[in-house]
Protein backbone atom coordinates (compact mmCIF):
# COMPACT_ATOMS: atom_id res chain seq x y z
CA UNK A 1 0.00 0.00 0.00
CA UNK A 2 1.35 3.44 -0.97
CA UNK A 3 2.45 5.70 1.88
CA UNK A 4 2.03 8.75 -0.35
CA UNK A 5 -0.04 8.75 -3.52
CA UNK A 6 2.16 11.10 -5.57
CA UNK A 7 5.80 11.87 -4.74
CA UNK A 8 7.90 14.53 -6.48
CA UNK A 9 11.66 14.05 -6.28
CA UNK A 10 13.61 17.19 -7.16
CA UNK A 11 17.15 16.26 -8.20
CA UNK A 12 18.01 13.24 -10.28
CA UNK A 13 21.36 12.33 -8.76
CA UNK A 14 22.37 9.29 -6.74
CA UNK A 15 19.96 9.87 -3.84
CA UNK A 16 17.03 11.14 -5.89
CA UNK A 17 17.25 8.34 -8.45
CA UNK A 18 17.63 5.76 -5.67
CA UNK A 19 14.51 7.07 -3.91
CA UNK A 20 12.62 6.74 -7.19
CA UNK A 21 13.83 3.18 -7.71
CA UNK A 22 13.14 2.18 -4.11
CA UNK A 23 9.69 3.81 -4.05
CA UNK A 24 8.81 1.96 -7.24
CA UNK A 25 10.13 -1.38 -6.01
CA UNK A 26 8.40 -1.15 -2.62
CA UNK A 27 5.25 0.59 -3.89
CA UNK A 28 5.79 3.34 -1.30
CA UNK A 29 4.26 5.76 -3.83
CA UNK A 30 1.58 5.24 -6.47
CA UNK A 31 2.94 7.92 -8.81
CA UNK A 32 6.55 9.10 -9.02
CA UNK A 33 7.40 12.50 -10.49
CA UNK A 34 10.95 13.78 -10.97
CA UNK A 35 12.42 17.17 -11.79
CA UNK A 36 15.94 18.34 -12.51
CA UNK A 37 17.24 21.61 -13.88
CA UNK A 38 19.49 19.71 -16.29
CA UNK A 39 17.80 18.59 -19.54
CA UNK A 40 20.38 15.82 -19.94
CA UNK A 41 19.58 14.47 -16.47
CA UNK A 42 15.87 14.57 -17.33
CA UNK A 43 16.62 12.67 -20.53
CA UNK A 44 18.47 10.02 -18.50
CA UNK A 45 15.59 9.75 -16.02
CA UNK A 46 13.20 9.20 -18.93
CA UNK A 47 15.49 6.68 -20.61
CA UNK A 48 15.84 4.73 -17.35
CA UNK A 49 12.05 4.84 -16.74
CA UNK A 50 12.57 6.13 -13.21
CA UNK A 51 9.43 8.29 -13.07
CA UNK A 52 5.93 8.58 -14.45
CA UNK A 53 6.57 12.19 -15.46
CA UNK A 54 9.77 14.23 -15.74
CA UNK A 55 10.33 17.96 -16.18
CA UNK A 56 12.90 20.70 -15.80
CA UNK A 57 10.11 22.77 -14.21
CA UNK A 58 9.70 21.49 -10.65
CA UNK A 59 6.99 24.01 -9.77
CA UNK A 60 4.65 22.60 -12.41
CA UNK A 61 5.00 19.08 -11.04
CA UNK A 62 4.67 20.29 -7.43
CA UNK A 63 1.02 21.12 -8.12
CA UNK A 64 0.28 17.38 -8.26
CA UNK A 65 2.43 16.09 -5.39
CA UNK A 66 1.52 14.92 -1.89
CA UNK A 67 5.18 14.70 -0.91
CA UNK A 68 8.00 16.83 -2.37
CA UNK A 69 11.56 15.72 -1.58
CA UNK A 70 14.46 18.12 -2.20
CA UNK A 71 17.45 16.08 -3.39
CA UNK A 72 19.77 18.94 -4.29
CA UNK A 73 23.03 20.20 -2.70
CA UNK A 74 22.56 22.07 0.61
CA UNK A 75 23.37 25.43 -0.94
CA UNK A 76 20.46 25.06 -3.39
CA UNK A 77 17.80 23.86 -0.92
CA UNK A 78 16.36 27.27 -0.06
CA UNK A 79 16.16 28.56 -3.63
CA UNK A 80 14.44 25.37 -4.82
CA UNK A 81 11.99 25.57 -1.91
CA UNK A 82 11.27 29.18 -2.79
CA UNK A 83 10.43 28.12 -6.34
CA UNK A 84 8.21 25.12 -5.56
CA UNK A 85 6.45 25.80 -2.23
CA UNK A 86 4.01 28.38 -3.72
CA UNK A 87 2.79 25.66 -6.09
CA UNK A 88 2.30 23.04 -3.39
CA UNK A 89 -1.27 22.34 -2.40
CA UNK A 90 -2.72 22.50 1.10
CA UNK A 91 -1.94 19.34 3.02
CA UNK A 92 1.19 18.50 1.03
CA UNK A 93 4.47 17.62 2.74
CA UNK A 94 7.90 19.05 1.97
CA UNK A 95 11.02 17.09 2.89
CA UNK A 96 14.69 16.90 1.94
CA UNK A 97 17.73 14.62 2.13
CA UNK A 98 20.37 17.17 3.11
CA UNK A 99 23.22 16.32 5.48
CA UNK A 100 22.98 19.74 7.17
CA UNK A 101 19.86 20.63 9.11
CA UNK A 102 20.14 23.77 11.28
CA UNK A 103 20.83 26.48 8.71
CA UNK A 104 18.99 24.65 5.94
CA UNK A 105 15.78 24.38 7.96
CA UNK A 106 15.85 28.07 8.86
CA UNK A 107 16.41 29.02 5.22
CA UNK A 108 13.57 26.84 3.95
CA UNK A 109 11.09 27.84 6.65
CA UNK A 110 11.05 31.39 5.29
CA UNK A 111 9.19 30.16 2.23
CA UNK A 112 6.63 27.86 3.85
CA UNK A 113 2.94 28.68 3.85
CA UNK A 114 0.37 27.38 6.30
CA UNK A 115 -0.85 24.56 4.11
CA UNK A 116 2.56 22.84 3.77
CA UNK A 117 4.29 20.81 6.50
CA UNK A 118 8.08 20.54 6.44
CA UNK A 119 9.62 17.28 7.72
CA UNK A 120 13.41 17.44 7.29
CA UNK A 121 15.15 14.10 6.68
CA UNK A 122 18.64 12.79 6.10
CA UNK A 123 19.23 9.25 4.81
CA UNK A 124 22.70 8.14 5.91
CA UNK A 125 23.53 6.30 2.73
CA UNK A 126 25.50 6.83 -0.43
CA UNK A 127 28.45 5.99 -2.62
CA UNK A 128 31.14 8.10 -4.24
CA UNK A 129 29.27 7.90 -7.56
CA UNK A 130 26.73 10.40 -8.89
CA UNK A 131 24.03 10.80 -11.51
CA UNK A 132 20.80 8.97 -12.35
CA UNK A 133 22.66 5.86 -13.51
CA UNK A 134 24.39 5.51 -10.13
CA UNK A 135 21.22 4.97 -8.11
CA UNK A 136 19.87 1.61 -6.98
CA UNK A 137 16.74 0.49 -5.15
CA UNK A 138 18.47 -1.06 -2.13
CA UNK A 139 20.67 1.95 -1.29
CA UNK A 140 18.68 2.68 1.89
CA UNK A 141 18.23 -0.89 3.09
CA UNK A 142 19.30 -1.22 6.75
CA UNK A 143 20.72 2.32 6.74
CA UNK A 144 19.70 5.07 9.15
CA UNK A 145 17.44 7.92 8.12
CA UNK A 146 17.41 10.79 10.61
CA UNK A 147 14.30 12.98 10.84
CA UNK A 148 14.41 16.40 12.52
CA UNK A 149 10.81 17.71 12.57
CA UNK A 150 9.49 20.29 15.01
CA UNK A 151 7.00 17.71 16.30
CA UNK A 152 8.30 14.13 16.08
CA UNK A 153 4.94 12.82 17.31
CA UNK A 154 2.87 14.45 14.59
CA UNK A 155 0.90 12.41 12.10
CA UNK A 156 2.90 13.88 9.22
CA UNK A 157 6.25 12.99 10.80
CA UNK A 158 4.98 9.46 11.36
CA UNK A 159 3.93 9.24 7.71
CA UNK A 160 7.33 10.40 6.44
CA UNK A 161 9.03 7.95 8.82
CA UNK A 162 6.86 5.16 7.42
CA UNK A 163 7.83 6.16 3.88
CA UNK A 164 11.54 5.78 4.71
CA UNK A 165 10.93 2.57 6.61
CA UNK A 166 9.22 1.20 3.52
CA UNK A 167 12.33 2.07 1.49
CA UNK A 168 14.32 -0.05 3.97
CA UNK A 169 15.67 2.56 6.39
CA UNK A 170 15.93 2.52 10.16
CA UNK A 171 14.50 5.72 11.65
CA UNK A 172 15.96 8.04 14.29
CA UNK A 173 14.59 11.38 15.47
CA UNK A 174 16.96 14.18 16.53
CA UNK A 175 16.96 17.90 17.02
CA UNK A 176 18.62 19.77 14.11
CA UNK A 177 21.42 20.90 16.43
CA UNK A 178 22.25 17.39 17.60
CA UNK A 179 22.09 16.08 14.02
CA UNK A 180 24.61 18.64 12.83
CA UNK A 181 27.20 17.97 15.54
CA UNK A 182 26.80 14.19 15.16
CA UNK A 183 27.23 14.38 11.38
CA UNK A 184 30.12 16.82 11.70
CA UNK A 185 31.86 14.16 13.81
CA UNK A 186 30.96 11.05 11.83
CA UNK A 187 30.93 12.41 8.28
CA UNK A 188 31.82 16.02 7.60
CA UNK A 189 35.20 16.29 9.35
CA UNK A 190 36.31 12.83 8.12
CA UNK A 191 35.63 14.06 4.58
CA UNK A 192 37.57 17.26 5.29
CA UNK A 193 40.49 15.18 6.55
CA UNK A 194 40.30 12.93 3.50
CA UNK A 195 40.36 15.83 1.07
CA UNK A 196 43.27 17.37 2.99
CA UNK A 197 45.31 14.18 3.21
CA UNK A 198 44.96 13.44 -0.50
CA UNK A 199 45.95 17.02 -1.32
CA UNK A 200 48.95 16.83 1.01
CA UNK A 201 50.16 13.56 -0.49
CA UNK A 202 49.97 14.89 -4.02
CA UNK A 203 51.68 18.16 -3.11
CA UNK A 204 54.62 16.54 -1.31
CA UNK A 205 57.74 17.37 -3.29
CA UNK A 206 59.34 14.03 -2.43
CA UNK A 207 56.37 11.99 -3.67
CA UNK A 208 55.07 12.36 -7.22
CA UNK A 209 51.40 11.85 -7.97
CA UNK A 210 52.19 8.67 -9.89
CA UNK A 211 53.94 7.21 -6.85
CA UNK A 212 51.00 8.07 -4.62
CA UNK A 213 48.75 6.11 -6.95
CA UNK A 214 51.24 3.26 -7.45
CA UNK A 215 52.06 2.64 -3.79
CA UNK A 216 48.70 3.43 -2.20
CA UNK A 217 47.86 1.01 0.61
CA UNK A 218 44.37 0.14 1.82
CA UNK A 219 44.02 3.04 4.24
CA UNK A 220 44.97 5.64 1.67
CA UNK A 221 42.68 4.02 -0.90
CA UNK A 222 39.78 4.40 1.53
CA UNK A 223 40.63 8.07 1.92
CA UNK A 224 40.80 8.62 -1.84
CA UNK A 225 37.43 6.90 -2.20
CA UNK A 226 35.88 9.33 0.27
CA UNK A 227 37.59 12.27 -1.43
CA UNK A 228 35.99 11.26 -4.74
CA UNK A 229 32.60 12.47 -3.49
CA UNK A 230 30.75 15.34 -5.16
CA UNK A 231 32.80 18.54 -4.58
CA UNK A 232 29.85 20.93 -4.96
CA UNK A 233 27.85 19.14 -2.29
CA UNK A 234 30.77 19.06 0.12
CA UNK A 235 31.56 22.73 -0.40
CA UNK A 236 27.96 23.46 0.61
CA UNK A 237 28.09 21.06 3.57
CA UNK A 238 31.14 22.73 5.10
CA UNK A 239 29.74 26.22 4.65
CA UNK A 240 26.24 25.35 5.88
CA UNK A 241 27.46 23.35 8.90
CA UNK A 242 30.33 25.71 9.66
CA UNK A 243 29.92 26.00 13.44
CA UNK A 244 29.69 22.28 14.13
CA UNK A 245 32.51 21.46 11.71
CA UNK A 246 34.82 24.04 13.28
CA UNK A 247 34.03 22.72 16.75
CA UNK A 248 34.98 19.18 15.76
CA UNK A 249 38.03 20.35 13.79
CA UNK A 250 39.33 22.20 16.87
CA UNK A 251 38.94 19.07 18.98
CA UNK A 252 40.63 16.96 16.31
CA UNK A 253 43.57 19.36 16.13
CA UNK A 254 43.99 19.10 19.92
CA UNK A 255 43.97 15.30 19.79
CA UNK A 256 46.30 15.20 16.79
CA UNK A 257 48.70 17.56 18.56
CA UNK A 258 48.74 15.21 21.56
CA UNK A 259 49.68 12.30 19.30
CA UNK A 260 52.30 14.45 17.61
CA UNK A 261 53.88 15.14 21.01
CA UNK A 262 53.80 11.45 21.90
CA UNK A 263 55.62 10.56 18.68
CA UNK A 264 58.16 13.36 19.14
CA UNK A 265 58.97 12.30 22.71
CA UNK A 266 58.95 8.55 22.05
CA UNK A 267 55.98 8.12 24.36
CA UNK A 268 54.98 4.63 23.30
CA UNK A 269 52.65 4.16 26.26
CA UNK A 270 50.51 7.15 25.22
CA UNK A 271 50.34 5.89 21.63
CA UNK A 272 49.45 2.35 22.70
CA UNK A 273 46.74 3.62 25.06
CA UNK A 274 45.19 5.80 22.35
CA UNK A 275 45.32 3.11 19.66
CA UNK A 276 43.80 0.53 22.02
CA UNK A 277 40.89 2.80 22.88
CA UNK A 278 40.20 3.66 19.24
CA UNK A 279 40.44 0.02 18.20
CA UNK A 280 37.76 -0.81 20.76
CA UNK A 281 35.50 1.87 19.27
CA UNK A 282 36.11 0.48 15.79
CA UNK A 283 35.15 -3.00 17.02
CA UNK A 284 31.88 -1.62 18.39
CA UNK A 285 31.15 0.04 15.04
CA UNK A 286 31.68 -3.26 13.22
CA UNK A 287 29.55 -5.13 15.76
CA UNK A 288 26.77 -2.56 15.25
CA UNK A 289 26.68 -3.43 11.55
CA UNK A 290 28.10 -0.13 10.29
CA UNK A 291 31.15 -1.61 8.58
CA UNK A 292 31.63 -1.59 4.82
CA UNK A 293 34.41 -1.36 2.26
CA UNK A 294 33.84 2.39 2.08
CA UNK A 295 32.25 4.38 4.94
CA UNK A 296 28.61 5.23 4.30
CA UNK A 297 28.22 8.24 6.57
CA UNK A 298 27.47 11.25 4.42
CA UNK A 299 28.93 9.96 1.16
CA UNK A 300 25.96 10.99 -0.87
CA UNK A 301 24.89 13.30 -3.60
CA UNK A 302 22.14 15.18 -1.86
Image (spheres, rainbow, N blue to C red):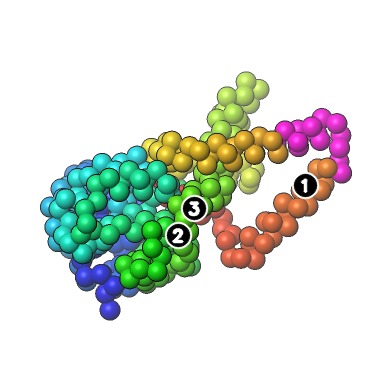
- Residue stretch in magenta: 256-269
Given contact means CB atoms under 8 Å apart, are the residues at marks 1 and 2 in contact? no
Q: Residue at x 29, y 72 (%)?
A: 3
Q: Which residue is mark 2?
A: 146
- Reply above or below: 152 against 179: below
Check disc 2: other Cα within 10 Å, few if <14, some if 14-19, many if 20+: many
Question: What is the x, y in percent for residue 40?
Answer: 21, 45
Where residue 226 sits: x, y (%)? 52, 44
Q: Relative to 31, is 273 on the left or the right?
A: right
Question: Vertical placement of 16 versus 156: above or below?
Answer: above
Label located before the other in sequence (3 or 2): 2
Quadrant in the rendering for residue 236: top left
Using the image as rendered, state which of residue 225 and residue 124 is in the foreground: 124
Q: Name the mark on residue 274.
A: 1
Could you tell whether 64 is left or right of 205 in the image?
left
Question: Which numbered tag is attached to residue 179?
Answer: 3
Q: Which residue is the extreme one toward the top?
A: 205
Amino acid sequence: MAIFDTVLIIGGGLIGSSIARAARATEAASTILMADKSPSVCDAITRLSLADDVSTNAADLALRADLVILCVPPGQMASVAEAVVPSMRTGAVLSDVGSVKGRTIKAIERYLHGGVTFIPAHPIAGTEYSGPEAGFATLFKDKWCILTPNDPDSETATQVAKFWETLGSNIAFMSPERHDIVLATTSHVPHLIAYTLVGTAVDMEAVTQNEVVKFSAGGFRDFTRIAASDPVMWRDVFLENRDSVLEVVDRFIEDLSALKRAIRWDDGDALLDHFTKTRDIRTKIVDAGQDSAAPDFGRQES
